[in-house]
Image (spheres, helix red, strand yellow):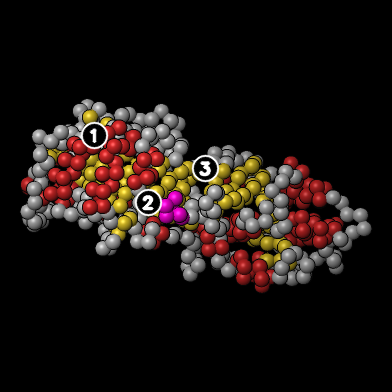
Amino acid sequence: MTSPDPASLLTEQQGRALFPREISRFFTGDPGHALLVKGAPGTGKTLFTIRGLDVLERDGDVLYVSTRVDQDTVHEMYFEEHFSLDKTSILDLSQDPFELPLDMDVPFERLDLDALLEWIQQVKAASKRLTIAFDSWELIYEYLATRHDEPPDIETVTTQLVALARQEGIRLLLVSETADSSPLEYIVDGVVTLQVAEDERGRTRRHLRLEKLRGVRIGNRLQPITLANGQFQAITPVELPTVHTGTGSGTWKPRPNSKAKFSTGIGDLDPILSGGYNRGSVVHLELGTDLSRDAWCVLTLPTIRNFLVNEMGVAVVPPREGSPGLLHNDLNSVLTPRVFDTYCHVFETYAGPSRSKDTYENDDQSEAPSETSRAVSKSDVDSSIGIGATRREEQSRTSDNVVERKRSTTIDERLESPVEGGQLDYEPYMEYVEQVRKQSDGPLLHVISMDTARSTFETWLGDFANYVALHNDLAILITKPGTELRKRADRVADMHLRLERSGKAIMLYGENPLTSMLGIGIDQSQSIPRITLTEMV
């Protein structure tokens, strides 16, 4: 799975990508902001704070101040994976607050609450733009308060500290050991809360809640996070159009299938599923609420690509609200036209875009075809993005005019369309895929959105699963909220995966087999965007 590589130095762009953008803007905008970092023990407050120092160190000096453990232990536990931070960034107040790598004079012999602000001013004077993290602020206050007969309360000291930070342009992170409401929230400029819980099946769910950030608009208040490899990482939102938007200059490289498995087409997912999808199996892909209409393509497009590049037939019945032309545009940008025209069959079910606020409205790829559910030729596909095509013998040649092995490349036009009025009928579909099978001489991939299935399909769903197993095919049945056949699809499925929204991010997890929560990302460093998965731990 994709996670920060401890063997290589993170670039500035990579490091910032792992930290919430809203908090980066909070600190890089107006200097002198103070952030209160709240959360129960074990929620990741220290790792969040160190990730923040890692980001902010790039334009100034940073200090991590604690009283809990010695410098070497803190560095070994938290800092070794952050190559921009070293031991000189760590200060243990219980040891010696004067051993700093800074040219400064300290006008007092012992640090207490009265001397704290003066000490910070001295550090600031010897530094360029300064960031100080106090972890935890309550423990540091209590440690220094023991040196007073009548110490001021923590609210008074915090008010003085925040006022100094604003005056001197110092960035502060104050780590609090409680998730409860605190008077300190009204003193500081920003508040974030880290949360962790387990669902009913024992999966860890972590979130960062942005309570307030002065001067920053919070558009994504609840953000999923992970502590994979002992590092804080925000699971970033995914713009779904980037899943199927390439430069047009790349070619899909096939992922290997084994004798027992079909690759999912996703490098991070195959090992999680012990090599991929079982041959002869049915996969139930359940879509959660609030997902956009093209969320189904996140997992299915890579599998479709991998089948086609291996010259295996694919039959797709997309959701009725899916973007028309999505498959045509994506697959023709990463595969040769001959492969798409020979092996891919898409049955038109488009019923117009959803009125949900979360749907994508950028559908200028094509207009919905005026006719439904017919086989059309390659020229028809180019002019009206639609359904499975009538294949011509000359289209089975490569650009080098090398003739492939002989096979029938024409679907019998006398066949009844399996989709009528946007709904899928079982028997016509099975007759059609038998024609598809003759073209590829091998296993088929069936991708069927169950919101298109007529009631007759429920009657035959068990038989369909047996058919898939008999022919060593792979079937992916897509269900979404309100789909009548959702429970029935789950009963016949060998595998049950679920996509859901968390904040603005998309999460994947397995109900069968049981998996961790997996954050979905898009790596666009190559000509073909690659789906990545980050485990939530």
Q: Residues within 10 Å of mark 2 (few under 14, many from 20)?
A: many
* Point 25% across, 27% down: residue: 421
User: What separation in Å lies between label 2 and label 3 (alpha carbons)?
Assistant: 26 Å
Q: Which residue is mark 1?
A: 425
Is the Cβ of the residue at disc 2 closer than 8 Å to that at disc 1? no
Q: Residues within 10 Å of mark 1 (few under 14, many from 20)?
A: some
Tell me where the magenta segment starts and ends, as one range. 510-515
Q: Earlier in the sequence, mark 2 or mark 1?
A: 1
Residue 397 horizontal/vertical position (percent): 10, 52
Q: Which residue is mark 2?
A: 495
From the viewer's perspective, is the residue at label 3 or at label 1 nearer? 1
Q: In the figure, is residue 406 to the left or right of 229?
A: left
* 512 magenta-colored: yes
* Point 85% across, 68% down: residue: 109
Quarter occupied by residue 74: bottom right
Total marks in image: 3
* 342 magenta-colored: no
As shown in the figure, which amino acid type bears the numbered disc 1? Asp
Dot 3: element: loop
Residue 201 horizontal/vertical position (percent): 52, 51
Rendered image: mark on residue 503: 3
User: What separation in Å lies between label 3 and label 1 (alpha carbons)?
Assistant: 37 Å
Residue 424 horizontal/vertical position (percent): 25, 34
From the viewer's perspective, is the residue at label 2 or at label 3 nearer? 2
Dot 2: element: strand
33 shown above or below 83: above
Residue 171 horizontal/vertical position (percent): 67, 52
Is the Cβ of the residue at disc 3 closer than 8 Å to that at disc 1? no
Dot 1: element: loop
